[in-house]
Amino acid sequence: MQIPAADSATAAAVREKPALQRGELSALDDATLRAALRRMHLIRKFEEVAEQSYMRGLVHGTMHLSIGQEASAVGSTLHLRPDDYILSTHRGHGHCIAKGADPARMLAEFFGKETGYCRGRGGSMHIADLTTGNLGANGIVAGGLPIAVGVGMSIKAQKQSRVCMVFFGDGAANEGAFHESLNMAAIWKLPVVFLCENNKYGMSMDIANAMAVANVADRASAYGTRGITVDGNDLPAVAAAAKIAIDQARQGDGPTLLECKTYRLRGHSKSDRNLYRTKDEIEAWRQRDPIRRLQDELVAQQRIEARELAAIEQGAQHEIEEALEFAKSSADPDPAQLTRDVYAG
Amino acid sequence: MPAEVITQEAGVRQLSYAEAIREGLGQAMEADPRVFLFGEDVGVYGGAFGVSGDLLRRFGPERVIDTPISELGLAGAAVGAALTGMRPVLEIQFSDFVTLAMEQIVNQAAKIRFMFGGKASVPMVVRLPGGSGTGAAAQHSQSLEAWFAHVPGLKVLQPSTPHDAKGLLLAAIDDPNPVLIFEHKLLYKTKGPVPAEAYREPIGKAVVRRSGRDITIVGASIMTLRAAAAAEKLAGEGIGTEIIDLRSLRPIDFATIAQSVRKTGRLLIVYEGVKTMGIGAEIAAMIAESDVFGALVAPIARLGGADSPIPYNPSLEKASVPQEDDILAAARRLMHKRKR
Ligand SMILES: Cc1ncc(C[n+]2csc(CCOP(=O)(O)OP(=O)(O)O)c2C)c(N)n1
Ligand SMILES: [Mg+2]
């Protein structure tokens, strides 16, 4: 694994070509690995239930599934502390669960219920759980990046030892907000981790047609900050790279642009007909399913028994089924309260 | 498949609002090599709402251009291309994202002609799917047209029918000024008669959709459809409703509104954008400032969006913008009111 220099300003470290790195399971203890696997299953089951509920007409609107990207969400947040912050995206269910949100309240939000995280006002694209440091998903591509700069300023001003991790996609890296935010975070050495989930497409736009550099992380050099690219379907690799970025942010060494190369196995949203990619490509990535991959490695390295794997998956399944019951049986908000909470105070 | 519908004999066909826009785009591109369409996912995907459909296949990637997600840059690119001899049509995927492009539209596109002393023009068209009703929540459901109607130098359109969606688009492409067209997401699948030829609807002219003598309802886009449904019920109660479809917010056709209000003496303005500081305020003030004011037999009424972001929950979402029943109730209330 290539370890970027601690001093973010050294041009040498910055110019170092980011390479896909393999992770080592040995860096993680058994309990951490079990917890990580359980979270990955929870995310997968949550999204499968969300998808089915949508298909059955139980919920309206749209949703963006991250099925296939679970290692990136769980690995990147594995070494965050409970009081660290995250900012998420439209494809944010995974980040939310990974940071410790209750899937029942998330599903209730998805169902538009008063018991949901946003009391049914926000829906899938705006779930926020302030108690776990989750400052919210975002319906605006790259909407979270400038906010992360402000969170970093706030952490610094209050002399806290927190870190803010902001998620965004490859497509978001072409918004002005991305460039402005990286620059500010770099010049002010803010405790921010810019976590790009490069799933190859921004909706139908292949990243190869949307940017002239090979990796999003290559852009880090333009801001004099660290850039790392990892195999985003390799949980230990993501966790190891994120640990470096998190530690350096916490130590006052400024931001890192960490890119997880991954793939969304489902369409962009419900209206996607997958006209821009081939079945073969989807199938090839299905073979690299991050959950199966982690399980295979755990078994191969005798870190876990196959029997226990099934129990972890079933536990997650059970939790999501209960969450669904909670969501379905919760009450709708009262339309008379429509304009409540437009203003504070 | 819409392509087949389009190749039928000339005449009037039933097309959807989305098909009508696509037909207009295709005809504009066939007729004028300066016209091109660009935006996020307008090519291979066929547009987030399926409007561009097969245009990439027909016109190729030089004229139907999939872009990175860069709204400010896209709006500026439209300005630059328009300024130097092209006729760009930009699709902003959801009208909400125009907030990222405000600088180039408001500071550049709208002002260049004036600032340059009339020596340049910016003939660009921006298409913006807007409105609520799809469960897309606060950042994907807004009605921001009034913001732009506040900017001299821009023209702002809101077609309600497939016929107008095509005719106004073609007029906008011809127009030497920046024109913003707010399309409504819920209208894309609605059908209506559309002539096959490339016709234009005049920018700045409202139409009377229904004649009546008791009450005037002014609206645009989907609100005119909801008003029409309400008017049917009002007719059953013996109330004659006149419906004015604005089609264009800037310039606004005050003469048509004034003529109707002079006849009915009652005015209800219905719009999906937030009621406060919205288009209703402007129309009401125009009436109040004019000699039509004396013809009013009841106070002017406005029915607009709630003073809140659009909520996700379906029943809250419905409650946040005027529905047919709200229009009906407001019209009935107005019929019972008298000016003191
Ligand atoms: C400012 C803005 N522009 C466009 C969109 C519409 N949109 C939503 S997600 C998306 C693709 C985003 O791609 P990426 O950042 O790679 O994230 P991914 O969906 O792949 O997770 C687009 C174009 C939006 N929500 N906000
Ligand atoms: Mg992407």
Image (cartoon, grey):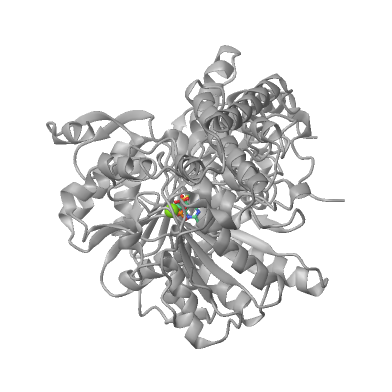
Q: How many marks?
A: 0
In this rendering, would B278 be left or right of B184? Answer: right
Foreground of the two, A189 or B215: A189
In this rendering, would B55 be left or right of B96? Answer: left
Foreground of the two, B198 or A192: A192
Q: Is residue B103 visible?
A: no
| Residue visible at 82% across and 73% down in the picture | A159
Q: Is residue A306 above or below residue A235?
A: above
| Residue visible at 59% across and 58% down in the picture | A27
Residue B14, image quadrant: top left
In this rendering, would A115 be left or right of B193? Answer: right
Q: Locate the C terminus of chain B and report the quarter of the image it occupies.
A: top right
Q: Locate the N terminus of chain B and report the quarter of the image it occupies.
A: top left
Q: Is residue B269 above or below residue A170?
A: above
In this rendering, would B9 be left or right of B23? Answer: left
Q: Is residue B120 visible?
A: yes
Q: Is residue B322 above or below residue A321?
A: below
Foreground of the two, B247 or A230: A230
